[in-house]
Amino acid sequence: MSEAKIHWSRIGESGTVLGIRLMLMSYCVLGHRGFRLFLFPVMVYYYLFRVEARNASKQYLRHVAEFLPSARQSKLSSFRHFMAFGEMLLDKLLAWMGKITRRDVVFETPDVISEFESNRAGGVIIVSHLGNFEVCSALASDLPHLKLTVLLYTRHAEKFNQVLSQFGGKAEVEVMQVTEISPVTAMLLAQRVRAGEYIVIAGDRTPPSGGGRVTSAHFLGRNASFPQGPFILAGLLKCPVYLMFCLKLQGQYHLYIEHFASRLKMDNRASRQKALEEAVRKYARRLEHYCVMAPLQWFNFFPYWTDTEGQRDNPIYHSGRDRGAS
């Protein structure tokens, strides 16, 4: 199997427990500036030797640059993308350790936050690999009654999780490791939603099983495959669906939560596929919107697009550039 065709979930971990621990220790001893000095040679190494990740970064940056003014295009580089990823790993650890709190986060959608406070019905929150969704732990600490279960495919991040367990995670969020949503898992999640809890799941990576439950959607002007799984789950749970994006802007996290649907209606087979495709494409448009806001913060270092050219005269392409909520 060629490198370009290897699924993201089968790519081995980079780095070691010792390396990740040293990065965290450098932050504790030297602060953020010292951490960046330590991070620089590490990212130089990965930039030089992780060819697939570097090529995937360059492909993504070429695509997102088409949506940016020339002044912002000039600030894009693959190495800066790698550096942003390294800094995100530190913030990820700090978030799970409870070091990123309410005062570190700007809640950009207070009306939706109020909806979480008043509505105890539970639901599904669809996130992405844009920014740092682990900051949702700050949301949980700010709303004590809010219970979150994060579904993660973590086989490729065992070393990272080992460090996290050693330093003692304190975030008020439960992490559930999954490779697929089995009937048993679905029943467990349904019980949690009925109890008023929220299920958090990423919507921008295809299934680790390599199955065919994907929808092709225009994303940054070209076709990409997005998983149907998160939207199938939301439909089965018959609950409200939200999108959440967390971007680091001017050194501070900004949390955006959008009401996506009161319920994804998939009551009959005839309308199910259409509803799934519409939901996936709506999600792709919103992901695109936020990628344009923070282009160096989408951390998907794998081949992503199913075509490389795209069509600028395609009406779907133009609708994908709509910056308003769908």
Image (spheres, rainbow, N blue to C red):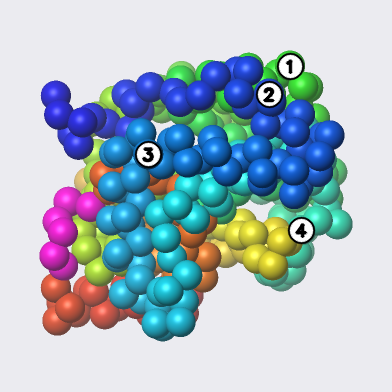
Q: Main secondary structure of the magenta part?
A: loop
**Amino acid of disc 1:** Gln
Mark 1 surroundings within 10 Å by alpha-carbon count, few (fewer than 14), some (14 through 19), many (20 or more):
few
State the CA–CA distance, disc 3 to disc 1.
30 Å
Mark 4 surroundings within 10 Å by alpha-carbon count, few (fewer than 14), some (14 through 19), many (20 or more):
some
Query: Magenta residues?
Result: 305-310
Q: Residue at left 45%, top 35%?
A: 45
State the CA–CA distance, disc 2 to disc 1.
10 Å
- As helix, strand or loop, the secondary structure at mark 4 comes to strand
191 or 288: nearer the viewer: 288
Circle 2/circle 1 CB separation < 8 Å: yes
The residue labelled by disc 1 is 166
Is 306 left, or right, of 232 in this rendering?
left
The residue labelled by disc 2 is 21
Lower sequence index among marks 4 and 3: 3
Q: Position of residue 47 (x, y in %)?
A: 41, 41
